[in-house]
Structure formats: C-alpha cells, structure tokens
Image (cartoon, helix red, strand yellow):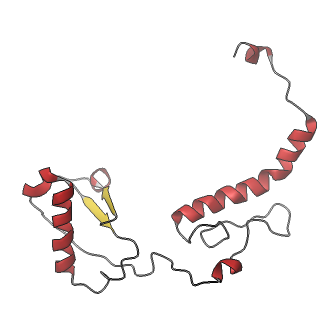
C-alpha cells in the first residue's frame, strides 16, 4: 500500500471514506477485485489497529493502468525545456524537461520553471535598477 487518503469530508455522509492508491501497480493490475480488497483491508487493519473492528459498508476497485508514466531509456532528451524562441511564451506540463518523471510533482516543477522563465526579464531589470528605496514605514521593521 503506497497512499491512504481520508476523503470523508469531501464525500459527506456518515462514517469514514478512505482511498488506497497504488503507484506502478503492474503486478496488481490483473488481480481480482475481491483479492485486492482483502489484501488492502488487512493492510489498513495493520496500519490502523482501531480499524480492525470496523464495519466496511462498501468497497470498490478502479484501475488506471496509464496513471504512472514509465519512460523508456533515452526519451528524456526529447522533452522540451520551459523556454521557447518566442518572447513571453513558456512551456509547462508534466511532459516537459524537469529532471522529474511525468508526474504531478514534475508538472508542479515545470510550472515553477515556466514562471521563472517568464519573470527573468523583470528580475534582470530590477537588479539593474539597483536596490529599492525603503519607505519610512519599512524603517521600523
């Protein structure tokens, strides 16, 4: 078991709503849902001993075999950087060159790189203009 999310507030209703998420779950992809439920309910009971006596009202299994991107060797060189040849345009997305896999974390880093790229001209202008003048209000801080 990789992740356990408490979705109770989002789901509303009575009881507790937990979500178990597996990454790169190739071995589990073809296992019957009943077998996966048995394995993960037991794992939840081990992780949360107070849950051992819980009454499970409903449980289901969803499968998204393409949720975790698995790159092949050499494909990182094909991913574009945030910068482009057009001023004011930057690329962002999990598929860009971040040094991270094509995941949510990679997408976040890509967005930050794109924002840095777009802000670079303003940052250079600020540094060339010198230090900002401190106001009297700032003097006391």
Q: How many marks?
A: 0
The reply to whether residue 115 is visible in this rendering is yes
| Residue 24 at x, y percent in the picture | 40, 76
- Quadrant hosting residue 99: bottom right
| Residue 78 at x, y percent in the picture | 70, 80
Q: Quadrant of the C terminus?
A: top right
| Residue 65 at x, y percent in the picture | 40, 81
| Residue 124 at x, y percent in the picture | 87, 46
Going by the image, does 83 lie left or right of 33? right
**Residue in the picture at 20% in, 64% down:** 43
- Quadrant hosting residue 94: bottom right
Q: Which of the two residues, 106 or 56, is positioned nearer the viewer here?
A: 106
Going by the image, does 101 lie left or right of 96? left
The reply to whether residue 54 is visible in this rendering is no
Going by the image, does 135 lie left or right of 69? right
**Residue in the picture at 85% in, 70% down:** 85
Q: Residue furthest bottom?
A: 30
Q: Which of the two residues, 126 or 10, is positioned nearer the viewer here?
A: 126
**Residue in the picture at 21% in, 84% down:** 32
Q: Residue furthest front?
A: 73
Q: Quadrant of the N terminus?
A: bottom left
């Amino acid at each position: 078991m990789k992740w356990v999310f408490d979705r109770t507030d989002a789901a509303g209703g009575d009881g507790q709503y937990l979500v178990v998420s597996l990454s790169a779950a190739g071995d589990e992809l073809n296992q019957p849902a009943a077998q996966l439920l048995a394995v993960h309910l037991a794992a939840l009971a081990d992780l949360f001993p107070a849950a051992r006596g819980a009454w499970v009202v409903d449980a289901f299994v969803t499968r998204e075999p393409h949720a975790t991107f698995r790159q092949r060797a050499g494909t990182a060189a094909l991913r574009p950087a945030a910068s482009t040849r057009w001023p004011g345009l930057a690329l962002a997305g999990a598929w860009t060159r971040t040094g991270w896999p094509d995941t949510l974390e990679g997408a976040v880093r890509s967005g930050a790189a794109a924002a840095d790229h777009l802000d670079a001209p303003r940052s250079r202008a600020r540094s060339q203009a010198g230090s900002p003048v401190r106001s009297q209000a700032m003097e006391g801080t």
